[in-house]
Image (spheres, grey):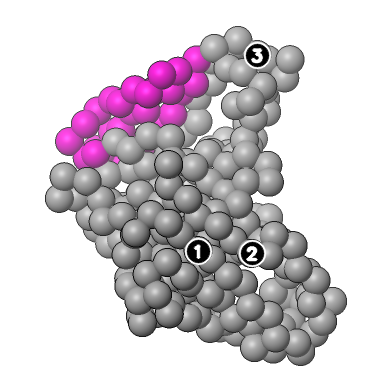
Amino acid sequence: SQLAEENPWALSVHEGESVTVNCSYKTSITALQWYRQKSGEGPAQLILIRSNEREKRNGRLRATLDTSSQSSSLSITATRCEDTAVYFCDSSSGSWQLIFGSGTQLTVMP
Amino acid sequence: EAAVTQSPRNKVAVTGGKVTLSCNQTNNHNNMYWYRQDTGHGLRLIHYSYGAGSTEKGDIPDGYKASRPSQENFSLILELATPSQTSVYFCASGDEGLGGSSQNTLYFGAGTRLSVL
């Protein structure tokens, strides 16, 4: 029951460049979260954006939300090697379960 | 900082054996979860709990049991392990969301890598 999907499947950029990961979801939401998972670690929340918000920032991260097209994006500016990770989005269905898609693998090269 | 600790970090088991994965959280969260992560499938929910004494089935519960003896501890039990259960398992705890929203922010452990031979 995949309620959200990230795309593209993989991205590669050089340090200092900006990058955007996209997410499409299938249900009405109360909020959408972006998570990051580095190799060998569990996922960690990056940003939570509520359905009445269009944009949310957290340092070098910027998330947008378009409820009409049921899509979200996560942009990272001035990327660093330590941003290399898999990025997931979660679309709240109103329950307290969390359901991830398969994620986007971001590689930041020196 | 939220803290979720899983043990063991790595486990090799034999087919048909019993495996218990343990999780401890110091966040005083009501909700706890067990996921498995496999290439091409992302994270899939196995069992979850909304308090001590409760366990609920997630999306893929077959072959797994869960136990929540206390607020802090949540275990995943494989009574008869099979090679198809070779995976990385993550435990997470969560609060009820902020500002009245049902959105649930999760805090994950570092994972347990299980190989069933």
Residue B73 located left or right of residue A55: right
Please give the name of the residue rendered at 37% of the width and 28% of the height, measured from the top-left corner. A63
State the mark number for residue A46: none
Residue B20 in the image: x percent, y percent? 63, 78
Q: Which residues are magenta?
A: A50-77
Type of residue at label 3? Glu
Quarter in which the C terminus of chain A is drawn? top right
Type of residue at label 2? Ser
Residue B67 in the image: x percent, y percent? 47, 81
Sort mark 1 into few (<14), some (14-19) or many (20+) by Cα contacts within 10 Å: many
| Chain letter of the residue beneath label 2 in the structure image | B
Q: Secondary structure at mark 2?
A: strand
State the mark number for residue B24: 1
- CB of mark 1 within 8 Å of CB of mark 2? yes
Cα distance, mark 2 to mark 3? 35 Å
Q: Secondary structure at mark 1?
A: strand
Q: Main secondary structure of the magenta part?
A: strand
State the mark number for residue A15: 3
For the question of whether residue A28 can be seen, the reply is no
